[in-house]
Image (spheres, grey):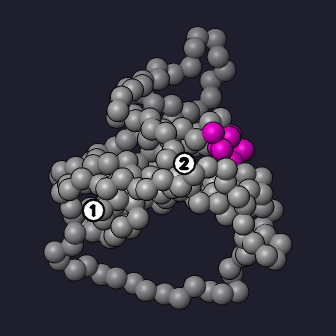
Amino acid sequence: MSHDYISNSGAASGDAAVASSAMSAVFADVRQEVDQGAVAPLFGAAMANGAGAPATAPAFASSAQSVAFAVSEQAAEQSAVRALAGASPEPELSGNGFTYRHNWGARRGQWTLRLNWSAVNPRSRVMVSIAEGAAGGPDAGKFIGSARYTVHNVAPRAGGVDIWVNIEWSSDILLYVDYLVVNP
């Protein structure tokens, strides 16, 4: 796996002054390809690829909770739920959709993760969920441990999607990312 480090020094001379959060500091930047065997279609769409067996994740450190903290549980407000299939879906979520869980391996700190995926384009609607991955690969699931996982930005682009994440933990722990992609 190669690591590409990127720095952006700002706008070129003569460009109109526009506020931007373009990167001015270097931080970890990773690019990986989609495991096509793990992509699941939405809305009954068919995928033209073979399903492969998921790789088994190596054993890494874990932030499994040793001390309980406050938990709040609520039921979904059914009147606010919007259908994606069957009845007419919300206009922004109509089209072809796919789900995919990616194992980004053991990580900590801030990362820009660049997933190359030909099904994604700049108009794609991409939702991302991150959490600590259970040992045994993506099919083993995710769990809530003591580490804090946050997503800061999600940016679809031609041929992929880039996300900025932060994992607050003292050692490298598994990061699984769920992607929901809808192409209008």
Q: What residue appears at the point 17 percent right and 77 percent down from the top-left corner?
A: 67
Q: Quadrant of residue 73?
A: bottom left
Q: SS at mark 2?
A: helix
Q: SS at mark 1?
A: loop
The tally of labels here is 2
Q: Which residue is mark 1?
A: 135
Residue 169 locus on image (x, y percent): 22, 55
Residue 52: tell me if it is visible. Answer: yes
For the residue pair 58 and 177, the one nearer the viewer reads as 58
Secondary structure mainly formed by the magenta segment = loop
Q: Amino acid at mark 1?
A: Ala
Residue 78 locus on image (x, y percent): 66, 87
Task: State whether residue 86 is above or below residue 57.
Answer: below
Relative horizontal placement of residue 94, taking residue 55 as reference (left or right): right
Q: What residue appears at the point 22 percent right and 49 percent down from the top-left corner?
A: 172
Q: In the image, is residue 124 part of the stretch drawn in magenta?
A: yes
Q: Amino acid at mark 2?
A: Gln
Q: In the image, is residue 176 part of the stretch drawn in magenta?
A: no
Residue 112 locus on image (x, y percent): 42, 39
**Quadrant where the image shows the N terminus:** top left
Q: Quadrant of residue 84?
A: bottom right
Q: Which segment is the magenta one?
A: 118-125
Tell me the mark number nearer the camera, choosing from 1 and 2: 2
Residue 132: tell me if it is visible. Answer: no
Mark 1 nearby-residue class (10 Å; few <14, some 14–19, many ≥20): some
Q: What residue appears at the point 66 percent right and 44 percent down from the top-left corner?
A: 119
For the residue pair 75 and 133, the one nearer the viewer reads as 133
Residue 148 locus on image (x, y percent): 31, 60
Label disc, if present, on residue 36 of the rendered structure: 2
Q: What residue appears at the point 74 percent right and 56 percent down from the top-left corner?
A: 96
N-terminal of the pair, mark 1 or mark 2, is 2
Relative horizontal placement of residue 25, taking residue 180 as reference (left or right): left
